[in-house]
Image (cartoon, rainbow, N blue to C red):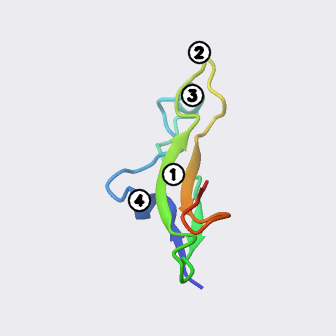
Amino acid sequence: MVLLDAWAYTRPLEPGWTWDRCNPLIAATLEPDARIDYVFVGSPDTRARGHILAAELVGAQPVDSIWPSAHMGVLVELRGGASDDGVVS
């Protein structure tokens, strides 16, 4: 079985740090930026369902000066779903 890192597949030139010192909760730890959150996806089926379309970070900005978490999440959009041309995320 082959699993693809969805971030590296869609954004190979971006580090995608999910543990980022721009967040004061992380800056206080004195640890370096890192990507600690991943979404791994298997190969698409014969109708391309499961093909990775996009990846983005979520929780990457504070809301009303409050960070939602110590680290960011990864949201991935995949081709597929209920219909042949549907998209699920």
Q: Nearer the viewer, mark 2 or mark 4?
A: 4
Q: Reading the chain from its start, which is encountered first: label 3 or label 4?
A: 4
Is there CB contact under 8 Å for labels 4 and 1?
no
Q: Amino acid at mark 3?
A: Ala
Q: Residue at x 59, y 53 (%)?
A: 37
Looking at the image, can residue 19 be seen?
A: no
Judging from the image, what secondary structure is the residue with disc 2 in? loop
Q: Residue at x 54, y 55 (%)?
A: 77
Q: Quadrant of the N terminus?
A: bottom right
Q: CA distance from mark 1 to mark 3?
A: 17 Å
Compared to residue 79, the image places residue 16 above or below, namely above
Q: Which residue is mark 3?
A: 28
Looking at the image, can residue 31 be seen?
A: yes
**How many badges with numbers are in the image?**
4
Q: CA distance from mark 1 to mark 2?
A: 23 Å
Q: Which residue is mark 2?
A: 65
Q: Nearer the viewer, mark 2 or mark 3?
A: 2
Q: Amino acid at mark 4?
A: Thr
Judging from the image, what secondary structure is the residue with disc 3 in? loop
Q: Position of residue 72 (x, y in %)?
A: 58, 40
Judging from the image, what secondary structure is the residue with disc 4 in? helix
Q: Amino acid at mark 2?
A: Ser
Residue 53 falls left or right of residue 14: right
Q: Which residue is mark 1?
A: 35
Q: Amino acid at mark 1?
A: Arg
Q: Nearer the viewer, residue 30 or 58?
A: 58
Q: Which residue is mark 4?
A: 10
Q: Reading the chain from its start, which is encountered first: label 2 or label 4?
A: 4
Q: CA distance from mark 2 to mark 3?
A: 16 Å
Picture quadrant where residue 26 is located: top right
Q: Reading the chain from its start, which is encountered first: label 2 or label 3?
A: 3
